[in-house]
Amino acid sequence: MARRAGGLRFGTAGIPLSTRKSSYVAGVERIRELGLGCLELEFVYGVRVNRVAAGTIKDAALRHDIKLSAHAPYWINLNSRDPEKVVASRQRIVQSAQIGALCGARSVVFHPAFYMADPPEKVFQTVKDNLVETVGELGQGTLEVVLRPELSGKAAAFGSLDEIVELSTQVARVAPCIDFAHCHARAGNFNSYNEFTGVLKKVSRRLGPQSLEEVHVHISGIAYGRAGEIKHINLKESDLNYQELLHALVDQHCSGLVICESPNLEEDALLLQETYHKF
Ligand SMILES: [Zn+2]
């Protein structure tokens, strides 16, 4: 399948379901066979890739022209009451960045914190201070890695659009992971061409137009209630207006990675990619 220079690449969160062997190298090969363009390494239950394996993943990705990103473990809360858990959270981000870099990943996505009933401004400051420390702890070999706090889907989880954009303006090497399904699930809005365009324009205005040349986007179908996200579902079972979303991404000239997190992974990634190519 022809890929544009620049433009958006589409891929899956973790290896495609139809991968014959459960390994990242096989996953990269399967992404290529499917005609997709990227893969997010899921370190969500721990960083279980060693340095040697990371090198083979990097080689496979280069060979097949597949771009990689990494998702840090779920067990991160930079606003934990327990100082040891905060330190462990920072270490999980650092470790994900270090192993991710060895795999050739350019972005590390993570869920920054829970509010724990604290005022949002206080949580913002705590998260920011810890991210500054984390960036200082990254060390050699990660210079190309961008840390990407993810727009959260739950009301109790820190990470509104404004919060992650603001963090990105204040901390070096931090940029948003724009999860449009979560953005929609937080309040039920953000589901039209104008609203999607508004999100992208805000990012461009606050972080500069070049930020849209290297976006990191998550998309999936989503079920939600009053507290926000309930679970990810397939696009066609959900109300997410993915056609208008893709249209907005095209019209704002976005380039970068779109990671599909629907349960059917590659099926919806291909649906998104096909829809994108129609515009
Ligand atoms: Zn996530």
Image (tube, rainbow, N blue to C red):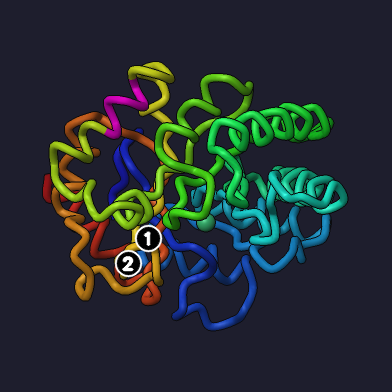
**Between 240 and 116, which is closer to the camera in this rendering?**
116
Q: Mark 1 and 2 residues: CB-CB less than 8 Å, in contact? A: yes
Numbered disc 1: secondary structure: strand
Identify the image quadrant of the N terminus: bottom left
Amino acid at pointer 2: Tyr
Outermost residue, right direction?
Answer: 84
Amino acid at pointer 1: Gly
**Between 204 and 79, which is closer to the camera in this rendering?**
79
**Between 13 and 83, which is closer to the camera in this rendering?**
83
Count of numbered labels shown in the rendering = 2
Q: Is residue 260 above or below residue 15?
A: above
The disc at residue 228 is 1
Q: Is residue 207 above or below residue 105?
A: above
- Which residue is depicted at the point 22% across and 70% down? 238
* Marks 1/2: CA–CA distance: 5 Å
**For residue 174, what is the image quadrant?**
top right
Q: Which residue is mark 2?
A: 224
Q: Measuring from the top left, give residue 97's x and y in whole percent.
A: 71, 44
Q: Is residue 77 above or below residue 17?
A: above
Q: Is residue 247 above or below residue 5?
A: below
**Which region of the structure is painted magenta?**
199-204
**Does the magenta portion include 34?**
no
**Between 214 and 122, which is closer to the camera in this rendering?**
122
- Which residue is depicted at the point 41% across and 32% down? 162
